[in-house]
Image: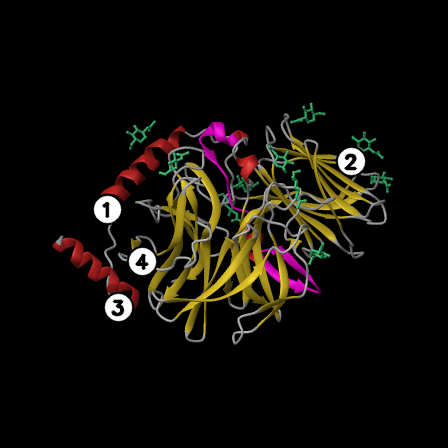
Amino acid sequence: MALLKIITVFFALVATCLSCKLSSECDQQCTDLEAYILSNRSTLNTRYRLQYHVSPPIGWMNDPNGFIYYESKYHIFYQYYPYGAVHGDMFWGHSTSPDLVNWETLLTALIPGEEQIFSGSAFVLGTTLGLIYTGHVGNDTVHDQSQYLAFSDDGEIFHKYASNPVLRRSDAITPDFRDPKIWKNGDYWYVVIGSKTADKRGEVLLYRTADLLNWQYLSVIAEANNATEYAFMMECPDFFELDGKYVLMTSPQGMNASGDRYQNLYQTGYMLGSFSYETFQFTVETEFQELDFGHDFYATQSTEKDGKRLLIGWFGMWNSTEYAPEVADGWAGALTIFRELSLSGTRILMTPVAAMETLRNGTAKEGTFTTSETVVLSQTGELIVSADWTVGVSLLLTGNTGGSNVTLEWDLENKKVVVDRDGEVRQVEWTPGTSASWRIFLDTSSVELFCGDGEVVFSSRAYPEGGWLVENKSTQNLTATIYNLNRSVPL
Ligand SMILES: *[C@@H]1O[C@H](CO)[C@@H](O)[C@H](O)[C@H]1NC(C)=O
Ligand SMILES: *[C@@H]1O[C@H](CO)[C@@H](O)[C@H](O)[C@H]1NC(C)=O
Ligand SMILES: *[C@@H]1O[C@H](CO)[C@@H](O)[C@H](O)[C@H]1NC(C)=O
Ligand SMILES: *[C@@H]1O[C@H](CO)[C@@H](O)[C@H](O)[C@H]1NC(C)=O
Ligand SMILES: *[C@@H]1O[C@H](CO)[C@@H](O)[C@H](O)[C@H]1NC(C)=O
Ligand SMILES: *[C@@H]1O[C@H](CO)[C@@H](O)[C@H](O)[C@H]1NC(C)=O
Ligand SMILES: *[C@@H]1O[C@H](CO)[C@@H](O)[C@H](O)[C@H]1NC(C)=O
Ligand SMILES: *[C@@H]1O[C@H](CO)[C@@H](O)[C@H](O)[C@H]1NC(C)=O
Ligand SMILES: *[C@@H]1O[C@H](CO)[C@@H](O)[C@H](O)[C@H]1NC(C)=O
Ligand SMILES: CC(=O)N[C@H]1CO[C@H](CO)[C@@H](O)[C@@H]1O
């Protein structure tokens, strides 16, 4: 009892005292978990392990969390279940990088207690790294969700605040209240949190606090308001300024497919508008648009560094990761490559972070890529393809010895970019400039296609066998530079 009291006082201080020193020891629970990860990792079948995308050391991964720059390194955390390639009780896995390309795996940051550690974000408080996450208590059907804090002095060992939770939804209309994204403005910390209305329309709520402990409800930032915008839940909201506009990025669940749009089980996209820190109203100016049109993209999180808005997404989808072949290998899920955002009119452009170029390790091909020509790569590659966009383009990406067939097509007649993965089609209109090119990142089991300046992007997992084989199936000769890429994440 006395010990409990001391611990409580100690952690109560942490939230308010910048100079309090936290213990930086991996305790027994942490030691046992790391021993399990270390020894059991060797049992993974590594055939589909990615070479430059962050993926769990073992077990399951979904949403990225806590993306931040702290003490000279980028930190990324993620929804993690080490004991199987399934969505079990959630932990937070953790990796760091000096450059967003070369990643190192750190100790598991948060281990579930009475609560599972659902999604959240990070903040820097002096020399302390803080995390705010959703504590999920109960099961899928009967549960309670509220917001918890944790702190670290060294960026690796985290301590949960003793008087969690610090923020609950005051009306009890829904138990779904999750994924706090925090930022600071003036004297206050703000969070947006995903939730739903009493009649089950997804909504995003705004709160603020001066001390991280006492929170004030401010406003509804956005809610699904009609049939076409219908969503029963908004997950993983993010709210930030980009080139003079405010962006509400969110992952709505329950939007029905409509033509080429919303083809995945759940969506991720954004609305642009203006926002006032006096009225706390977000005035929406553009309709919801998907950010990425690939098969496997969800639950984005962004952070700002040196004036750049950087973003990462879960390279997965709820109904594909569970059946992906890697599940049989003892792991599931990954993060996309890191992207930088900019605004062009009403469209957010996504480009790979500049440091991706440091992975290039010589070229497999440079120059004319003739009709019917094939290029065999090892397990990774970056392709820069230029074409005459007044003529159609078709590139087949397949395995050197079989596996997935992914066709990337410029459908001239419909003016659409089409990504066909084994018959599952995703497509969207594109307006190429004359000098536009496609930039394609291939990893052991993934494809990311960036069109032009990043106005159209597709992220899809795929499973080629025996390394990639790229074939020009177009009627025109293309110009291509194809780089080999080095590994930058642990096996
Ligand atoms: C998995 O980890 C447990 C706990 O550390 C250990 O007892 C077991 O031997 C490991 N299994 C393998 C196959 O390494
Ligand atoms: C979920 O928890 C509730 C309350 O404890 C319990 O009644 C219910 O059976 C549980 N459901 C499942 C699927 O475990
Ligand atoms: C629903 O909302 C969308 C986007 O704001 C709008 O274009 C559409 O007209 C609305 N539909 C109805 C039936 O209100
Ligand atoms: C979405 O699709 C489901 C199943 O097809 C249907 O029951 C529902 O009415 C649709 N919702 C909207 C808003 O169109
Ligand atoms: C996942 O859901 C989407 C949208 O409902 C559907 O088109 C797709 O076939 C599903 N995939 C799997 C593997 O169930
Ligand atoms: C790629 O890796 C090789 C072997 O480890 C190394 O020699 C080379 O310098 C690396 N290339 C780059 C661009 O880092
Ligand atoms: C890919 O295409 C080849 C050649 O048409 C075919 O044999 C193979 O079954 C296809 N792979 C998949 C996963 O559909
Ligand atoms: C493509 O390049 C090949 C080899 O340089 C050349 O023979 C052929 O005429 C070119 N085809 C077109 C359509 O330009
Ligand atoms: C980089 O390229 C060199 C020369 O082709 C090759 O020997 C080396 O294995 C490559 N490194 C990696 C990590 O692929
Ligand atoms: C127009 C043309 O030559 N298309 C060729 C593209 O490549 C495929 C596969 O080799 C050929 O079957 C097509 O004839």
Mark 3 vs mark 2: in front: 3
- Magenta extent: 326-353
What amino acid type should be assigned to the residue bearing mark 2?
Lys
Q: Residue at x 55, y 41 (%)?
A: 316
Membership of 266 in magenta stretch: no
Disc 2, ligand 10: is the CB inside 8 Å? Answer: yes
Amino acid type at circle 1 is Asp
Q: Which residue is mark 3?
A: 19
Q: Earlier in the sequence, mark 4 or mark 2?
A: 4
Determine whether the residue tagged by mark 4 lies in a helix, strand or loop: strand
| Alpha carbon distance from label 4 to label 2 | 53 Å
The Cα atoms of the two marked residues, 4 and 1, are separated by 14 Å
Q: Amino acid at mark 4?
A: Ser
The Cα atoms of the two marked residues, 3 and 2, are separated by: 62 Å
Identify residue for label 2: 473
Residue 27, numbered label = 1
